[in-house]
Amino acid sequence: MTDTPAAQLRQLLHARSVAALGTLHAGAPYVSMVPFAIARDGSGFIIHVSRLASHTRDMLTDARVSLLVMQEVGGGSSALALARVSIQGTAQELASDAPDLARSRAAYLERFPEAAQMFGFADFSLFKIEAESVRFVAGFAQAHSFSGDSLNRLLVG
């Protein structure tokens, strides 16, 4: 990885494309897996999800979410030494007239071109997750906190 925690975090989020998504499901924690893209202006994370999925219904009921992105396991590294980031924020469904819908769709399809056909399914929609707080662990005993605004700036830097 690179030298500074901010650079390490940026590299991790650009290198990985799948996150664990934590939602509140009937008041209890619920975790699922979602592919994600980074908004081109760094303002959040874009996910494309089906209304048939529990996590989508959960986000529509309570917008508070968490994303966990971690370094790929392997290379003989201890699980405690893996870089990982936990992002707490809010999820908002992008309406068909949202000003950033086209940019968000383009960012998602740039990362996942094979998902193009799913944009034709009526039950799928884009959500934007905006970070409020970030906890990044660069490795064992290397924890750092970032604000959502700081994360937004480093994602486009």
Image (tube, rainbow, N blue to C red):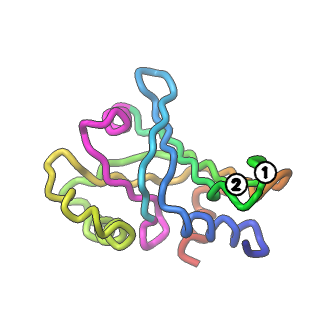
For marks 1 and 2, give the CA distance.
Answer: 17 Å
Relative depth, front residue between 133 and 29: 29
Label 1 sits on a secondary structure element that is loop
| Circle on res. 78 | 1
The answer to whether 85 is drawn above or below residue 117 in the figure is above
Q: Is residue 37 left or right of residue 12?
A: left
Q: Residue at x 83, y 52 (%)?
A: 140
- Tell me the amino acid under the disc marked 1: Ser
Q: Is residue 83 left or right of residue 103?
A: right
Crowdedness near tag 2: few (<14), some (14–19) or many (≥20) residues, C-alpha within 10 Å: many
Q: Residue at x 67, y 53 (%)?
A: 84
Q: Which residues are magenta?
A: 38-61
Q: Is residue 53 left or right of residue 46?
A: left
**Residue 12's x, y, as percent?**
62, 65
Q: Residue at x 41, y 46 (%)?
A: 91
**Residue 115's x, y, as percent?**
27, 62
User: What quarter of the picture does the C terminus occupy?
Assistant: bottom right
Badge 1 or badge 2: first in the primary sequence: 1
Mark 1 vs mark 2: give the one in front: 1
Number of marks in the rendered image: 2
| Circle on res. 150 | none
Relative depth, front residue between 157 and 79: 79
**Residue 131's x, y, as percent?**
53, 53
Relative depth, front residue between 96 and 108: 108
Q: Residue at x 45, y 72 (%)?
A: 41
Q: Which residue is mark 2?
A: 136
Are the two marked residues, 1 and 2, in contact with CB atoms closer than 8 angstroms? no
